[in-house]
Amino acid sequence: MLDSVRTLLASALGIAHARLELVGAELQQELSRLVALLVGSLAALFFAGLGVAFVAALAWRVQSRLGAGELVPVGRTFERGIALGQWVAGALMVIQLVRRVFRRR
């Protein structure tokens, strides 16, 4: 009877030891997943901040160039486009007129 109790106790201790090893392995896996998640999150935040800084730098540059008169707002660009179109149309009319005049001679 004492041998069977010892065997049962040894089996119970063996099972407990195996379970503790499994728990330790699972905790190690969860810890590595957590570290990977934190590193990925930090990388995402870094690149998001880099993107925001890039857009802000582009906006600042455009704003400074608008203030310096190097860039023209969209409305004025449209007006200049119409003026350019009218100029081109006028130039084409002059060219046609010159061709007609020289054809008659």
Image (tube, helix red, strand yellow):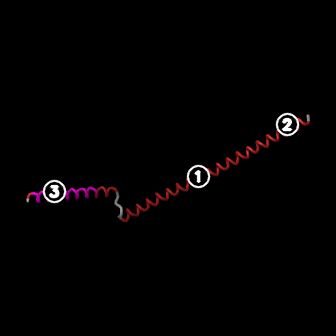
Mark 3 or mark 2: name the one nearer the start of the chain: 2
Classified by dominant secondary structure, the portion drawn in magenta counts as helix
Q: Farthest residue toward the right?
A: 2
Q: Is residue 41 left or right of residue 53?
A: right
Q: Is 98 a magenta residue?
A: yes
Q: Is 45 a magenta residue?
A: no
Mark 2 lies on a secondary structure that is: helix
Mark 3 vs mark 1, foreground winner is: 3
What numbered label is drawn on residue 41? 1
Q: Is residue 46 left or right of residue 83?
A: right
Image quadrant in which you'd find residue 18? top right
- Residue at 75% x, 45% y: name it: 21
- Residue at 8% x, 57% y: name it: 104
| Contact, mark 3 vs mark 2 (Cβ under 8 Å) | no
Q: From which residue to which does the magenta span run? A: 81-103
- Residue at 41% x, 61% y: name it: 63
Q: CA distance from mark 3 to mark 2?
A: 112 Å
What numbered label is drawn on residue 8? 2
* Residue occupied by mark 3: 96
Mark 3 or mark 1: name the one nearer the start of the chain: 1
Q: Nearer the viewer, residue 32 or 68?
A: 32
What numbered label is drawn on residue 50? none
